[in-house]
Image (tube, helix red, strand yellow):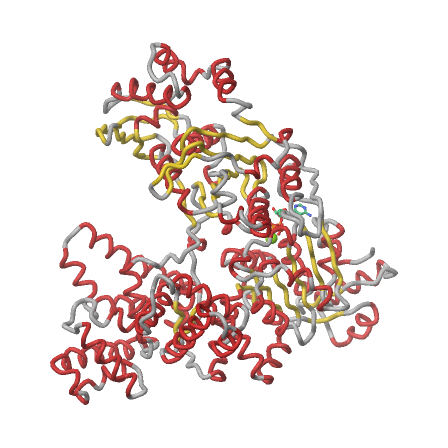
């Protein structure tokens, strides 16, 4: 095809280019992991926007001559009215502006990645107007502008899970319900699912009259929604549902957005829930230039209401839809892909596809089973340190696990061995009490009707405003149909508040003064004023403890967040900052530039890739979890998660498990995960043969020089039953005491160094070693010995 633009996308394969050039009408890109779906999405935007300074795109017809193409290239650089006719007879020339493009993804990290790649390709100034964001931030953006239409004030507050639970707990208590039956987490998740399905309290109640539990939840939901509305607040699920309600209830607003978004795109579409599906369809309803990309085998958010039918029924929803499949994988080696293919083949409910690559077979997958979780953790640390000694970077490695609890033992092994690591919690970062306190102040300043946050800080630091006073104020607010802040501001008019009147009035003045101050001060300076004026900083300082010092540092850390926010925004406002914070997850803090191993759940690894990947805790009962093993449908979801995890690896995949594991305070014995059995042996190198006996023999037949001294010790008769672990332990206890400050050491990963201190600690010795290249590290001697040469 003679298309000038096609030359610009030479790096893509033919199918990918087809998707990039298919800009008009509904398009579904259905393809397996690592086949370039996200890459296509980004290039598609570049194609739509880049051509010429007039930002047009063009697609020359097949019979265009060289001369035509030359002309067109020139025209696209400089689209003059005079040449417009000729250009238009040659091909479609259709200017699109950046704000007409909406690209939605699931995580902040993915959204940032798309933004930065677009900025590199199109220029920062231009690309920043593209709506590339998560569902949540897109909705917040729309709601901030339009929420008057649904009776909210633009300064509305966003409640996180913690805030949400606090409100719900109070409701459950006030209604004298049994909090074991109506466990707050269960209730919160039922309400969350209702919102995912766009069920308002009224609809939810109508649809659940039969069931005692659900009809009670309906009542709680009703009260909860009322309270949030009164506080001018929304929770995470509201953000999506309210946007849908806004658009459905206001045709004029809907039309405005439909006109605006000429091109709508959604990545990871397999994980959309009903509300997100409706939202995407509404926004794309104007031009129907909707492109969704996804993989039915990677649908892993059923528990959050995601429904795979959204992607499977796309072709039914849009009769003129085009579907493009990509099967070549560019991420992983063939061994990793074959393992993934074989694994997912065990799922009955799927469309079915095979991935292939021309990256070559690569190394075999390495499987390692240890006696204990500590053994597993040491293995992981050892593999990484050896890899780093071999020239790899710590940041090449990712540790993925089914649950966060599994990270503990690995973390300790990393600490002992001086392996730098970063945990991506997926939870909100700002969950430290002091940070939440400062944020609550900021929220109240921005939105004084926020009763919940007002309660949090009204007496922090102590201002002689007791619980009883707060409850009285809350009651008065209820009675007078107003906000607590309103009552507090007019405390003198309410004799019920008694002696606290003075303290309350002073508090209200404090907030009002800060509100005024905010208007003429840079945000970071203002924040410092809040710390000082509220007395919060002083109260911490007065404590003079180590812990309080840490808290001061955390509150200061928030200031660096504000400064960072200011450097990125043209008009940084307090509301803007708070909004960003509430949508913030730890994954944003993953600083790619620093060299550290990344640890996260398999769920948060979606869409990401790493050269070296460990899947730890691959045990029956953990992954798949016991609950998932009961129902085939749930087991299939777990298997899809395993498929997602396996396909994150580019070069090397490690699968590890332990025979014994301490979990939730109990020792559990477990078998290797059934998923491991589903991966054919030919792709795997394993440390266990059929029996333990053979394993022992295998180990004895291939002595590792590293353990020479321990073998000698072992022969003397101690610890015969657990060869691997015991050998290592004895080696360490023999060797460790010999170390003293001043000793020169050579560490496999950190190179040459000198011991500066040795402190006995919990049956081991804490070494402080100053390395020539990497500076001072603190290592536990027993583990460190493994890496000394
Ligand atoms: P996932 O399903 O995990 O989200 P994906 O389908 O979105 O994966 P991408 O992340 O877009 O896949 O691409 C995977 C890797 O392959 C990336 O490193 C990308 O740069 C690379 N890649 C994609 N297409 C090509 C290509 N045509 N040539 C070379 N590399 C490519
Ligand atoms: Mg992707």
Q: Is residue 141 above or below residue 414?
A: below
> Residue furthest toward the right?
63
- Pick the residue in front: 213 or 135: 213
| Displayed quadrant of residue 99 | bottom right
Horizontal side, residue 269 vs residue 71: left or right: left
Q: Looking at the picture, how far across and down is residue 48, in whole percent?
A: 68, 64
Q: Quadrant of the N terminus?
A: bottom right
Q: Position of residue 553 (x, y in %)?
A: 26, 55
Q: Is residue 524 above or below residue 784?
A: below
Counting from the top left corner in percent of width and height, residue 674 is at: 56, 38
Q: Is residue 463 above or below residue 306?
A: below
Task: Work out whether residue 234 can be spotted.
Answer: yes
Res 54 quadrant in image = bottom right
- At a point 40% along the width and 31% down the height, the residue shown is 372
Q: Nearer the viewer, residue 234 or 29?
A: 234
Q: Residue at x 19, y 72 (%)?
A: 467
Is residue 142 something that shows in the picture? no
- Which residue is more in the foreground, 234 or 155? 234
Quadrant of the snapshot with the C terminus: top left
Question: In the image, 175: left or right of 472?
Answer: right
Residue 596 position in % (x across, y down): 43, 41
Count how many numbered circles sit on residues in the image. 0
Nearer to us in this view, 557 or 545: 545
| Location of residue 539 (image quadrant) | bottom left
Q: Is residue 693 above or below residue 275?
A: above
Task: Please give left or right for residue 105 compared with residue 427 in the image.
Answer: right
């Amino acid at each position: 095809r003679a298309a000038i633009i096609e030359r610009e996308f030479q790096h893509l394969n033919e199918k990918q280019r087809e998707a990039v050039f298919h800009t008009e009408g509904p398009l579904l890109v259905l393809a397996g992991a690592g086949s370039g779906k996200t890459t296509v999405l980004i290039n598609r935007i570049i194609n739509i926007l880049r051509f010429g300074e007039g930002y047009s795109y063009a697609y020359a017809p097949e019979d265009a001559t060289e001369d035509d193409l030359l002309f067109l290239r020139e025209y696209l650089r400089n689209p003059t009215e005079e040449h417009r006719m000729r250009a238009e007879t040659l091909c479609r020339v259709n200017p699109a502006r950046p704000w007409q493009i909406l690209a939605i993804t699931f995580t902040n990290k993915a959204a940032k990645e798309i933004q930065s790649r677009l900025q590199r390709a199109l220029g920062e100034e231009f690309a920043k107007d593209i709506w590339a964001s998560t569902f949540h931030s897109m909705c917040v953006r729309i709601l901030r502008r339009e929420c008057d239409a649904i009776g909210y004030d633009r300064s509305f507050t966003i409640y996180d899970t913690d805030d949400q639970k606090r409100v719900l707990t109070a409701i459950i208590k006030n209604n004298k319900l049994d909090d074991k039956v109506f466990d707050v987490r269960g209730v919160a998740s039922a309400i969350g699912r209702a919102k995912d399905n766009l069920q308002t309290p009224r609809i939810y109640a109508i649809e659940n009259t039969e069931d005692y539990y659900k009809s009670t939840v309906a009542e709680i939901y009703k009260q909860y929604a009322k309270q949030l509305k009164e506080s001018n607040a929304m929770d995470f699920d509201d953000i999506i549902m309210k946007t849908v309600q806004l658009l459905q209830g206001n045709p004029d607003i809907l039309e405005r957005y439909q006109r605006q978004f000429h091109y709508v795109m959604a990545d990871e579409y397999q994980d959309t829930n009903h509300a997100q599906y409706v939202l995407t369809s509404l926004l794309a309803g104007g031009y129907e230039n909707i492109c969704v990309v996804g993989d039915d085998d990677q649908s892993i958010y059923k528990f959050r209401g995601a429904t795979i039918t959204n992607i499977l029924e796309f072709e039914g929803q849009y009769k003129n839809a085009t579907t493009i499949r990509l099967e070549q994988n560019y991420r992983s080696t063939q061994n990793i892909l074959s393992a993934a293919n074989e694994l997912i083949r065990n799922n009955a409910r799927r469309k079915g596809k095979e991935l292939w690559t021309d990256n070559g077979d690569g190394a075999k997958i390495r499987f390692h089973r240890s006696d204990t979780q500590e053994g597993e953790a040491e293995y992981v640390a050892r593999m990484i340190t050896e890899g780093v000694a071999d020239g790899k970077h710590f940041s090449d490695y990712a540790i993925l696990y089914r649950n966060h609890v599994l990270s503990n033992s690995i973390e300790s092994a990393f600490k002992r061995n001086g392996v730098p690591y970063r945990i991506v919690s997926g939870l909100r970062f700002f969950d430290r009490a002091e940070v939440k306190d400062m944020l609550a102040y900021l929220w109240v300043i921005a939105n004084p009707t926020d009763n919940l946050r007002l309660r949090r800080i009204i007496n922090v630091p102590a201002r002689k405003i007791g619980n009883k006073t707060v409850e009285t104020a809350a009651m008065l607010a209820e009675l007078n149909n107003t906000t607590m802040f309103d009552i507090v501001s007019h405390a003198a008019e309410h004799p019920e508040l008694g002696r606290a009147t003075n303290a309350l009035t002073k508090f209200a003045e404090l907030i009002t003064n800060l509100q005024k101050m905010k208007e003429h001060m840079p945000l970071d300076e203002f924040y410092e004023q809040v710390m000082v004026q509220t007395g919060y900083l002083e109260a911490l300082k007065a404590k003079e403890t180590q812990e309080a010092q840490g808290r001061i540092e955390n509150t200061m850390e928030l200031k660096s967040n504000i400064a960072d926010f200011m450097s990125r925004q043209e008009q940084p406002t307090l509301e803007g900052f708070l909004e960003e914070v509430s949508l913030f997850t730890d994954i944003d803090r993953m600083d790619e530039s620093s060299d550290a191993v990344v640890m996260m759940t398999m769920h948060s690894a979606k869409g990401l890739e790493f050269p070296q990947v460990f899947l730890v805790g691959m045990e029956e009962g953990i992954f798949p979890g016991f609950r998932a093993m009961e129902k085939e449908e749930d087991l299939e979801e777990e298997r899809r998660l395993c498929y997602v995890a396996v396909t994150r690896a580019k070069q090397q995949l490690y699968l590890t498990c332990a025979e014994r594991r301490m979990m939730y305070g109990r020792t559990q014995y477990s078998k290797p995960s059934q998923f491991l059995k589903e991966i054919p042996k030919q792709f795997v190198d394993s440390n266990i043969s059929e029996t333990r006996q053979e394993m022992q023999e295998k180990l004895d037949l291939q002595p590792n020089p590293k353990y020479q001294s321990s073998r000698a010790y072992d022969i003397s008769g101690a610890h015969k039953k657990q060869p691997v672990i015991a050998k290592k332990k004895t080696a360490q206890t023999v060797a460790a005491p010999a170390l003293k400050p001043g000793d020169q050491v050579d560490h496999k990963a950190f190179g040459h160094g000198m011991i500066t201190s040795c402190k006995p600690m919990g049956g081991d010795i804490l070494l402080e070693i100053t390395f020539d290249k990497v500076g001072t590290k603190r290592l536990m001697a027993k583990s460190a010995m493994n890496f000394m040469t």
